[in-house]
Image (cartoon, rainbow, N blue to C red):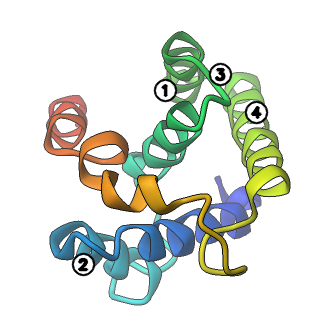
Amino acid sequence: MSQHKTHIKNIVDEHYRLSSQDSNLNYLWYLYSKGNKKGEYALFIIIAELQLLKTMNYITKEEMNNILNMLESNDEDNLSIAMYSLINLRKKRISDHGEYGIINNTNYDKIIKNYSYEILNHEILLTLKNKT
């Protein structure tokens, strides 16, 4: 993951801004963006970005699950393919809609309003807890 550190940081920073209407989730993102977890990797970071891509119709649930399965594989090639897929899909989303908080747009208004339901919710976090 070290070669993808900048991409992970950018994902964390954007989701920190996107989660601003939910103080609990926003605090979680704060810890990884500016707090004592800054620079650390956690699987929920990738899952949140995949959920965002799925919500914005860049991937299907099946494609999201395939990427997650590759991330959880012990095979370094699978890990690389999964990360490059995520990075390229993220770049496409940003190319189409801009990065939230960098430019002033309304493309993410619905996402912000429903962030704790559609992007990162308690069911997702419980699933992650059971995997560790």
Q: Quadrant of residue 66?
A: top right
Amino acid marked by disc 3:
Asp
Foreground: 33 or 80? 33
Q: Nearer the viewer, mark 1 or mark 2?
A: 2
Q: Residue furthest front?
A: 106
Q: Position of residue 108 (x, y in %)?
A: 54, 59
Disc 2 from disc 4: Cα separation: 28 Å
Comparing 99 with 6, the one in front is: 99
Q: Is residue 68 left or right of residue 122?
A: right
Relative to the observer, which residue lies in front, 42 or 77? 42
The nearer-to-camera label among 3 and 4 is: 4
Q: Quadrant of residue 115?
A: bottom left
Q: CA distance from mark 2 to mark 3?
A: 33 Å
Q: Are marks 1 and 3 in contact (CB under 8 Å)?
A: no
- Residue ID at (72%, 57%): 4
For marks 1 and 4, the one nearer the N-term is: 1
Residue topped by disc 3: 75
Q: Residue at x 54, y 31 (%)?
A: 54
Disc marking residue 27? 2
Horizontal arrangement in the rendering, residue 92 relative to residue 118 (left or right): right
Quadrant housing the C terminus:
top left
**Residue 72: mark in rendering:** 1
Residue type, label 2: Tyr
Q: Please tell me which residue is depicted at 60% across the width and 79% down the height of the picture.
A: 101
Query: Helix, strand or loop at disc 4?
Result: helix
What whole-number distance in Å separates the C-alpha atoms at marks 1 and 3?
Answer: 9 Å
- Residue identified by numbered label 4: 85
